[in-house]
Amino acid sequence: MGKPSTNSDTPSATGSTSAARALPEAVQQAVARIAGEAEIRIAAASDLGTDGRYGERWFVLAGDRVLVLSPDGDPANVLVDLPLKDITEAQVENLVGGGMLQAVVNGRKVDLVSYTNALAKRFGRVRGHLDAAAKGKPIPYEPERPDRCAKCGLIIGEETRVCPRCVRKGAVLRRLLGCARPYRMHLVLVGVLMLASTAFGLVPPYLTKILVDDVLIPRTNAYLLIWLVVGLAVSSILSTALGIWRSRIAAWVGNRSSFDIRAELYERLQWLSLRYYDRHPTGTIISRLTQDSGGVQDLLAFGLPWVASNALTVIGIGVAVFFINWKLALFALVPAPLVSIMTGSMWRRMRRAFHKYWHRWGRFHTLVNDALGRVKIIRAFSQQPAEIERFHLRNAELFDAAVYAEQTWATNMPIVSLLLGSGSLLVWYLGALIILGHGGLTIGGLMAFLAYLGMLYGPLSNLTQTTQWVSRALTAAERIFEVLDAEGYSERTPGKIVPEKIRGEVEFRNVTFGYEKHQPILKDISFKVRPSEMLGLVGKSGVGKTTVINVLCRFYDVDEGDILIDGISLPDLDLSAYRGRLGAVLQEPFLFSGTIAENIAYGRPSATAEEIMAAAKVANAHDFITNKPDGYDEQVGERGGRLSAGEKQRICIARAILHDPAILILDEATANVDLETEDQIQQAIARLIEGRTTFAIAHRLSTLRNATQLLVMEDGKITELGTHEELEGKQGVYYRLLDIHRKTSSITAMAG
Amino acid sequence: MKPPQPETGPTLRCLDPGQVRVFRTQDGRVRATIEGERSILAPRFLRAMPLTDPDLYISVREQEPGGKEVGLLRNWKRLDRESREIVQAELDRRYLHAIVRRIISAQSLFGVAVCDFETDRGVRQVTFRDARDSVVYLGESRILLTDAEGNRYDIPDIAALDPRSRALLAAIL
């Protein structure tokens, strides 16, 4: 069996000659034989061999030769050898579970090298580099961003970028403690209380020794009895009271620090650009705020005090038992490591069983939530029996996991107790031998010894789990710091120009943009819209219409070219000031929980009631709002769930009117409403767009008839630009779309 | 007035393997010919049900960007030998997921599971961010695992794995 294939040991794709050093010798020799001393411009290893098995193949651009080699031979076998001049374009074909790098040669696609999904990003970049080389452009320098830890090879992935194994625990811990710096006096107090409560906690067994040796066995010193009992009571009460005080302060400091971290994290998330959100799934971001910050809270509030307290107890007991009898102490500690390891292993087994149980609970919860949330659909399709069957399966799965977890617990816990008690058997035996042999140990000493031993194994076993537990918490902390440090994605790096007024002139100048840089969605787009004009964006789904809007809103920065607002480059404009003059009415009207009035005034919270109502009137919303039982104070429900689609849309229009934008975006604003409602919305929109530069996307082309210009897009490029009449006369793409639209309308009319 | 007819019909069209011939042209490109009807240059062959019944229905489609379906090839193994070999090669080229035969090792490390799988494509070390969330159950004993990099691993029958593999799998799931 060969060495497991991972992508961690394959070199990067790169546009520099340094790649030559990473090439296997056999590949280097083969390249030198074909291309001589030519510069190696691109070199990238794939993870699939020629037979489709995991292996290695190399893609190399050496001088003007495109080569694919298999390093199996000596020198390597050359699988593809193409002159660069024959290639017009480089492409990537997405396959199931991977992809294929292809070159277009004389209009024909030639397969170059296949790879698994693990290398999709690498070959996406290689495609861009090869394409640039084929078109005579310079190969951009884009260092590979590895998905695996460079040190240990463990996967770190796009959304974490943190290796949990190699995370610099010391540095993270220091930074984390830095978050608690404002509360350092509290921490000092916690430390002092911890020392004191641990010390008082160690007193009772020693007092027991005196009680047995000096009072009970000699049956003298009766006067000591009361003082010893008082001593026992005082030390126990003080240890408990100081422990409570310490825990209360530690809980406050820990929670306060994580409160600060959560606040900083949330503020940061509000300012991160949308590109960050594209690359990080919402679930992951939410887990930063909940689970990760919870992990940090656990560490600060409970974990660190717990570790310190356990460590102090172990040290204190160690000192005490050695003080009582050092020989017996040495014997007593012999089984301690073994007991700790065994109990640690049992804890891990129990934890695994409970993780499985909790996970099944999660799946069970999802099923119930999903089924009850679509109860109408289930009944409409008479799927109750199937749903009940699904429920039974999941319920049985949960039952199995619960039984396993509980039984594991029921079996392991007594064994753990037995193991913890095993050390004391040895002490009983050896201690008794020492006493019988008059070896310097008293009966009281033995009892105190046993009491200390009982207090030792618990903290010792706890400490064995500390490493893994602290590692997990520190990884959570590092993930939080990663968000706080994500400068590259920040929207808080705005331009400096704060315009007094935005007239609304918009110009796209040779704009190229892709959500992934190697896959452009907009390709060299140029157009100009004058103030108060309306531009209609037309084209099939997926041609890039919404992307035009996204870059106009500067949700994303363009990769090439420029967007000018009133002649000023968009990145130079103050983002808040610019967005303050943008308004949007989108296909999915967004309302938040609150009243209708609050929703209309979202963009201008200072608006008066009269201004809100005036905006609603213009938006044809006033009448239906006042007909609601609570009028403008009506709660809209979560995401506006208590309103119809048309009502929600008109509230959004009212919001846009009140916001008074210079540039207005209408994205399929009437897509989800009936004809009558559409008419009302169209009237409202007609009033809204007056005097504003408007960008409108609509599938119903009739709604764009009044646009000053229509921009027709295909595959990220502008294919036609002109007025409705001009484009209709041209009988091109727009004409064809119009024809389809007319046919569809006639079907709709007949169906209606 | 009659409503306008849509350009393409909504009927599923099944192709008779006896009517279809797939071959390579002189310049190495694949071509499919449907007897007495049409010939398609560089067609794409897609499995309609790649997981549940990968070899039952093969969708024969025109080359991108149009990419319309020409028809559904049922029982494609009844094609003539040359055609069958080419279709098999095209399917192998497109579908890159691996079938797990044995689990060599599996361990949970700091919230991720790292496993060594022996598959039909060779030995591979794979990482799951959360193995329990990376699994899709495709029946009583079949699972599909998707690793942290988006690669898929099919275990067609858990019961057919050796006992150690089953135990390792149970530990991470």
Image: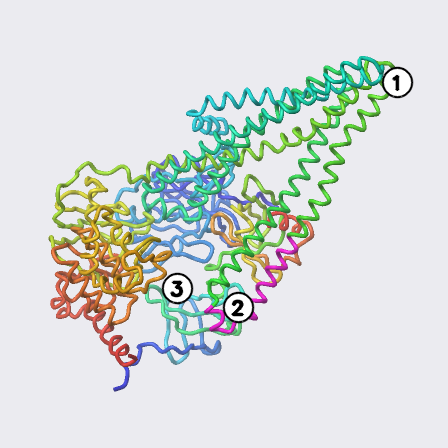
Q: Chain of mark 1?
A: A
Q: Amino acid at mark 1?
A: Leu
Q: Which residues are magenta?
A: A376-401
Seen in the image, is A738 located left or right of residue A83? left
- For disc 2, the neighbor class at 10 Å (few under 14, some 14 to 19, many from 20) is some
Cα–Cα span, label 3 and label 2: 23 Å
Please name whichever residue, A160 or A483, is drawn nearer the observer in this view of the structure.
A483
Is residue A359 at least partly visible in the picture? yes
Name which residue lies at 23% across and 42% down. A576
* Residue A728: image location, x then y, percent: 15, 70
In the rendered image of this protein, does residue A423 appear above or below residue B75? above
Instruction: Label 3: state its secondary structure.
Output: loop
Q: Chain of mark 2?
A: B
Q: How many marks?
A: 3
Name which residue lies at 45% across and 75% down. B20
Q: Amino acid at mark 3?
A: Arg
Residue A382 is covered by the magenta coloring? yes
Q: Can you tell which mark lies on residue B29?
A: 3
Q: Amino acid at mark 2?
A: Asp
Residue tagged 1: A436
